[in-house]
Image (cartoon, rainbow, N blue to C red):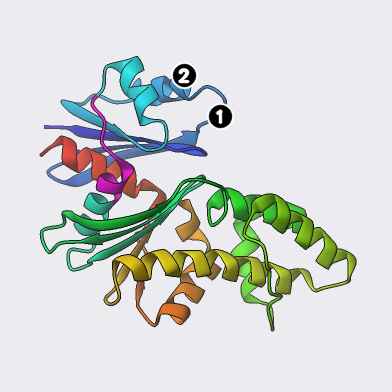
């Protein structure tokens, strides 16, 4: 039997097919301005017996394709526990929201905290700040890690933080140190959510922001806990949805 999961995020769409709980096919594309067409293009490439949709745009895709849906909280929890069976905490940071999830030993969700009211502490925040500082988003984390110190960023609002960054640049502050400060501001919000759901144990880091080397490194340092990274953190939602489709 083939089971599929499709994760419609604010920035990208991921598609995964599993057989016997193993990924046999995966594909990713930009969400763009027409996620329905993008999803249709991905779905044409596969065959499956059952599918679940998850992510930011799951309701839209579910209604357009008559497809059952599941929350990204359950999907990321299921994907994370499949890769790291002993983990009890998941941090998922995507383009538009972030989530801290604690799990029972069975892998079921025990408790979660979610930031979905503004872009602060999300991938979009980092993307805007990288552009303001003149860094490519793929190199942003690595550049921040090269900073000897960090500049304190007082605002978490994306609009105000961008203005603050522009002001710091005008004062001649080091770009890498500003970048490190921005990462620390995101990490402060993430650690707050994590500590409200779980105070010990390893943490599985999923979502596109998990690919940022500075985020994973500083999170481990601030929390004093081991950060576990899947081979492709962005695929965990789709992977979890596919596993749940089979269950």
Q: Residue at x 30, y 56 (%)?
A: 112
| Front residue (pair 3, 120) | 120
Residue 100 visible to the viewer: yes
When the figure is inspected, residue 134 is found, relative to residue 149, above or below; the finding is: above
Q: Image quadrant of residue 174?
A: bottom right
Residue 207 seen anywhere in this rendered image of the structure: no
State the image quarter where residue 69 is shown: top left
Crowding at mark 2 (Cα within 10 Å: few <14, some 14-19, many 20+): few
- The tag on residue 44 is none
Image: magenta residue range = 68-76
In the image, is 127 to the left or to the right of 160?
Answer: left
Q: Quadrant of the C terminus?
A: top left
Q: Is residue 237 left or right of residue 57?
A: left
Q: Picture coordinates of residue 166 (x, y %)?
A: 82, 59
Q: Which residue is mark 2?
A: 37
Image coordinates of residue 235 in percent, x first then y, are 36, 47
Gap in angstroms between the C-alphas marked 2 and 1? 9 Å
Secondary structure, mark 1, is loop
Name which residue lies at 34% across and 67% down: 196
Per the image, is 2 magenta?
no
Q: Residues within 10 Å of mark 1 (few under 14, many from 20)?
A: few
């Amino acid at each position: 039997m083939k089971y599929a999961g499709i994760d419609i995020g604010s920035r990208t769409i991921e598609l995964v097919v599993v057989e016997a709980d193993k990924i046999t096919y995966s594909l990713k594309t930009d969400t763009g301005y027409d996620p329905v067409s993008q999803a249709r293009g991905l779905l044409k490439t596969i065959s499956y017996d059952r599918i679940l949709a998850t992510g930011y745009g799951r309701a839209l895709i579910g209604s357009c394709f008559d497809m059952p849906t599941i929350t990204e909280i359950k999907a990321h929890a299921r994907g994370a526990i499949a890769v790291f069976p002993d983990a009890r905490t998941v941090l998922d940071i995507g383009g538009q929201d972030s989530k801290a999830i604690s799990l029972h030993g069975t892998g079921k969700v025990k408790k979660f905290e979610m930031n979905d009211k503004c872009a602060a502490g999300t991938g979009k925040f980092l993307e805007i700040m990288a552009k303001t500082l003149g860094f490519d988003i793929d190199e942003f984390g690595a550049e921040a890690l090269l900073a000897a110190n960090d500049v304190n960023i007082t605002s978490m609002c994306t609009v105000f933080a961008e203005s603050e960054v522009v002001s710091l640049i005008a004062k001649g502050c080091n770009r890498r140190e500003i970048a490190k400060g921005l990462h620390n501001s995101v990490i402060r919000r993430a650690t707050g959510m994590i500590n409200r759901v779980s105070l010990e144990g390893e943490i599985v880091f999923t979502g596109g922001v998990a690919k940022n080397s500075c985020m994973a490194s500083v999170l481990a340092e601030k929390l004093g806990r081991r950060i576990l990274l899947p081979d492709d953190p962005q695929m965990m939602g789709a992977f979890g949805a596919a596993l749940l489709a089979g269950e």
